[in-house]
Amino acid sequence: MKIPRRIIVCGMEWSIIISDTISRRKQPLWGLCRVAEKQILVSRGAPRLETLLHEVVHAIESSMGADWSEEQVEYLARYAATFIQANRPLIRWLLKSLAD
């Protein structure tokens, strides 16, 4: 399944861009959250679920005006990914409930 190109985070539209390479300060990255542009970049070779959730957590952090450490963002994204993977029936039920 293809990753959507647009998502809503805290009421704001963000773009998701899949890129061959992403870097900041000459360091290669799996993902990057560009707050001012409302863009989430994900490297083509990155683990998609974990990377996308990590960058979404950064987007939420920014929208809240929070200042979380990279370690906090990483843990929250990793635990969210684990939760989603371990609870697929609940995720399906939540999505169905939203559609009703």
Image (cartoon, rainbow, N blue to C red):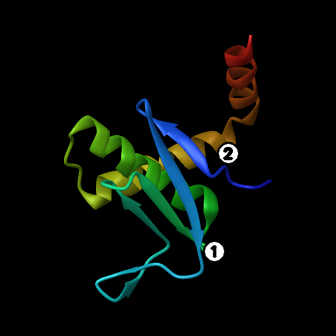
Q: Would residue 38 be found to the left or right of residue 48 on screen?
A: left
Which structural element holds mark 1? Answer: loop
Label 2 Cα neighbours within 10 Å, binned few <14 / some 14-19 / many ≥20: few
Identified by mark 2, the residue type is Gln
Residue 54 percent across, percent down from the top left = 45, 55
Q: Residue at x 41, y 47 (%)?
A: 57
Nearer to us in this view, 64 or 75: 64
- 24, above or below 26, in the image: above
Identified by mark 1, the residue type is Arg
Residue 4 percent across, percent down from the top left = 67, 49
Q: Where the C terminus falls, by quadrant?
A: top right
Nearer to us in this view, 53 or 21: 21
Q: Residue at x 76, y 20 (%)?
A: 96
Q: Residue at x 29, y 60 (%)?
A: 70
Q: CA distance from mark 1 to mark 2?
A: 21 Å
Q: Would residue 45 be found to the left or right of residue 39 on screen?
A: right
Residue 46 percent across, percent down from the top left = 59, 72
Query: Looking at the image, can residue 78 be seen?
Result: no
Q: Earlier in the sequence, mark 1 or mark 2?
A: 1
Label disc, if present, on residue 44 of the rendered structure: 1
Farthest residue in the bottom direction? 26
Which structural element holds mark 2? Answer: helix
- 12, above or below 4, in the image: above
Label 1 Cα neighbours within 10 Å, binned few <14 / some 14-19 / many ≥20: some
Q: Which residue is mark 2?
A: 85
**Which quadrant holds residue 20?**
bottom right
